[in-house]
Amino acid sequence: MKGLILSGGAGTRLRPITHTSAKQLVPIANKPILFYGIEDMAAAGITEIGIIIAPATGDEIREYVGDGSQFGVEITWIVQDEPLGLAHCVLIARDFLGDDDFVMYLGDNMLEQGLTEFVEQFETARAAADAPQLTETAVVPAAQILLAKVDNPTAFGVAEIGPDGEVVQLVEKPEVPPSDLALVGVYLFDPTIHEAVAAIEPSPRGELEITDAIQWLVTSGHRVNHEVLVGWWIDTGKKDPLLECNRLVLDTLRRSVEGEVDDASSIDGRVVIEPGAKIVNSTVRGPAIIGAGTIVEDSYVGPYSSIAIDCRITHSEIDNSVLLRRSSITDIPRLTDSLVGRDTEISKGDARPRATRVMLGDHCHLEIE
């Protein structure tokens, strides 16, 4: 089985962060979101992975991921020149995928349960095709989708499930949902999907929709199985869900203090201090992670904070926030629920007359105390 990770989106919902960086590289607990998907595939035994990238952010993603050897996998890069839909990604990945089964994964989704059980279930069902005891009525699945129970199914693509556990219909944002089971961004396909993506037409928004391709499989008589997600699932495409995901992952931390902590400082709870970080006359209360090369001085870093490498926090308090690399926070009495981009400086000025002075790019959101 091969893997296909989609990392070509523009990330408009995370601007201004994504004006200068790919959304899949925004860190969760100091690790790029994309890395979690690659690691999940490797844990499921998938070592050949194609990654869909866009021209604007592809070079940066290539630089971060490399050849895949750090994950124990082999990466093939596939460029999608225009965002023409998820099914279009399958279309342009045809040469890489060949006639193999594959798992398709949205690069900005995060799952608690991993992929191993999901993949094993599909492979077991596919292997039944060769079993001598297979009955004439048995149908081997051409696809398997992952579903999650949601409170507001009218906002999602929703699956209608038949009596034998097969998907009988997919409905996009229905006014009257046939179930509360929404599509999660993880799919398993056999080679039949290539016929499906070639047969469908673009949707009104001009994209080849993967839901249309799966519906084509159902309508054409192919079996589509499903599994209901165990644990949480988060689309990290917006700030608040990203911060929530950061909290959930930080809750799994194991304490590790490898950086320098002076005698005047206090490290409480599940805290990771990476090598090269320095904590001076400060308190860090977990769960939290402090990146390599970061200096925290005369400050308080509270729970659910992810501070990337080479940051500087001085005379400040911060909690429930994600700081990207080389950010600087100075003389700020309380920073919370925040996502701070790379090379960003936040400070309290002493100039008179006292006023708030800012330089903000497009699509920013600023709250003043």
Image: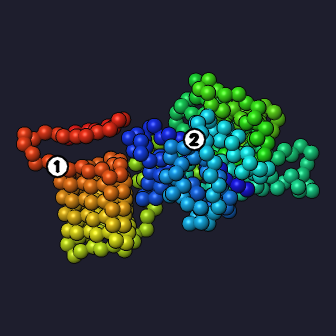
Q: Is residue 21 left or right of residue 266?
A: right
CB within 8 Å, label 2 to label 1: no
Q: Is residue 319 left or right of residue 20?
A: left
Q: Nearer the viewer, residue 147 or 358?
A: 358
Q: Which residue is mark 1?
A: 348
Q: Is residue 231 left or right of residue 127?
A: left
- x and y percentages locating residue 117 in the rendered image: 66, 57
Q: Nearer the viewer, residue 264 or 328?
A: 328
C-alpha separation, residue under disc 2 versus residue under disc 1: 45 Å
Q: Is residue 319 left or right of residue 204?
A: left
Residue 176 showing in the rendered view = no
Q: Which amino acid, mark 2?
A: Lys
Residue at horizontal 17 percent and vertical 40 percent from the top: 356
Q: Nearer the viewer, residue 338 or 304?
A: 338
> Mark 2 or mark 1, which has the lower sequence index?
2
Q: Which image quadrant for residue 114?
A: bottom right
| Relative height, residue 253 to residue 163 (above, below) | below
Q: Residues within 10 Å of mark 2 (few under 14, many from 20)?
A: some
- x and y percentages locating residue 107 in the rendered image: 56, 48
Comparing marks 2 and 1, which lies closer to the viewer?
1
Give the structural element (helix, strand or loop) at label 2. strand
Q: Nearer the viewer, residue 83 or 32?
A: 83
Res. 323 mark: none
Q: Quadrant of the C terminus?
A: top left
Q: Which residue is mark 2?
A: 149
Residue 65 showing in the rendered view = yes
